[in-house]
Image: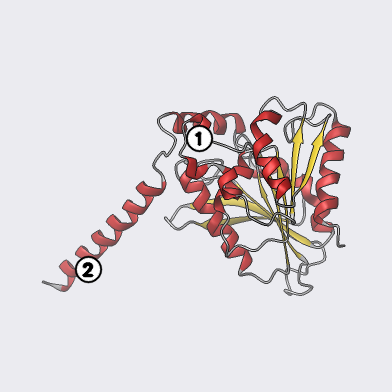
């Protein structure tokens, strides 16, 4: 076999293998409605708009390469105590935000300025297929993306590892967790306990991935939530309570970023921040 033919064969083989991985990750696991629902949700999220973060002088656009070669787009809000140019004053830690299914990173980044002021780097990525992130919007793929993101962040030079996951983000976070991923404080806000009630495999039910020790978890449920009502999260929260989690059941809270009263939204964000930064 000639050198050119050999190289060609190897290239085709690698491409085929990469294609198989892509097809496997981006196949629907919840039936035909999965791509339709993700299309509807991403449509509601709208288009990315860099002007939303223009006033955040410490915001930096970042990319993340997934295991199947997709490029995710997002932002890092750099810790204000950090001298980026000279790589000095190491951040105290990171906050990774996993948003809801109809949100983009640039829409909510500014809400987490207090963490940057406290010395934390804040990371928010658009889910694959959302905004400028590449790939098809599929549950299996997004779970794998965040397993990789968490692994990458945890190999970095961060002492404190914080998570805020809301709605779909809570599902993704719990499904992505494994014993190798060590986190300091986790807030899961308004996430259901099961997806199998809607045609997904039980292996994707968040309740089946809840850690045995939840002492470092806080779960939030809002009695005014019409998106994920309290019944949908009840079993998950009860099990989390038994395993040591702090449960906040608030009579005024709606779905995250959907509280009708701005003061209620601000109280919610302060509650999350206080829990995360309690050792400050």
Name the N-terminal-most of marks 1 and 2: 2
Q: How is the image coloured?
A: secondary structure
Q: Secondary structure at mark 1?
A: helix
Quarter occupied by residue 84:
bottom right
In the orientation shown, which residue stands out farthest toward the front? 242
| Foreground of the two, 96 or 90 | 96
The answer to whether residue 73 is above or below residue 156 is: above
Q: Secondary structure at mark 2?
A: helix
The percent coordinates of residue 109 (x first, y second) are 72, 46
| Foreground of the two, 144 or 108 | 144
Q: Residue placed at 48% from the left, 45% from the top?
A: 203
Q: Residue placed at 82% from the left, 50% from the top?
A: 273
Number of labels in the image equals 2
The percent coordinates of residue 115 (x first, y second) are 80, 55
The answer to whether residue 227 is above or below residue 156 is: above
Q: Which residue is mark 2?
A: 7
Distance from Cα at disc 1 to Cα at disc 2: 46 Å
Instruction: Please identify, in this view, whether the residue under mark 1 or under mark 2 is nearer the observer.
Output: 1
Q: Quadrant of the N terminus?
A: bottom left
Quarter occupied by residue 177:
bottom right
Q: Quadrant of the C terminus?
A: bottom right
Q: Which residue is mark 1?
A: 196
| Foreground of the two, 94 or 47 | 94
Q: Residue placed at 64% from the left, 31% from the top?
A: 232
């Amino acid at each position: 076999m000639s050198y050119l033919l050999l190289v060609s064969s190897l290239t085709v083989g690698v491409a085929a293998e990469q294609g198989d991985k892509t097809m496997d990750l981006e196949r629907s696991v919840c039936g035909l409605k999965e791509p339709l629902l993700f299309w509807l949700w991403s449509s509601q999220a709208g288009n990315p708009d860099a002007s939303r973060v223009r006033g955040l002088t410490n915001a930096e656009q970042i990319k993340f390469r997934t295991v199947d070669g997709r490029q995710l787009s997002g932002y890092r809000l750099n810790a204000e105590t950090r001298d980026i140019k000279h790589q000095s004053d190491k951040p105290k830690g990171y906050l990774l935000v996993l948003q809801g299914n109809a949100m983009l990173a640039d829409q909510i980044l500014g809400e987490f300025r207090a963490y940057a002021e406290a010395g934390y780097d804040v990371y928010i990525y658009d889910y694959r297929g959302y905004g400028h992130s590449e790939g098809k919007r599929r549950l299996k793929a997004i779970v794998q993306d965040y397993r990789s993101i968490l692994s990458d962040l945890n190999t970095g030079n961060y002492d404190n590892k914080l998570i805020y996951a809301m709605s779909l983000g809570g599902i993704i976070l719990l499904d992505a967790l494994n014993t190798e991923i060590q986190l300091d404080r986790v807030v899961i806000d308004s996430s259901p306990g099961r997806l199998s009630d809607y045609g997904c495999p039980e292996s994707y039910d968040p309740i089946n991935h809840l850690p045995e020790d939840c002492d470092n978890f806080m779960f939030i449920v809002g009695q005014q939530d019409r998106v994920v009502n309290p019944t949908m999260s009840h079993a998950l929260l009860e099990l989390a309570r038994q395993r040591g989690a702090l449960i906040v059941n608030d009579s005024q809270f709606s779905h995250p970023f959907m509280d009708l009263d701005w003061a209620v939204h601000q109280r919610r964000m302060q509650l999350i921040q206080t829990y995360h930064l309690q050792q400050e």
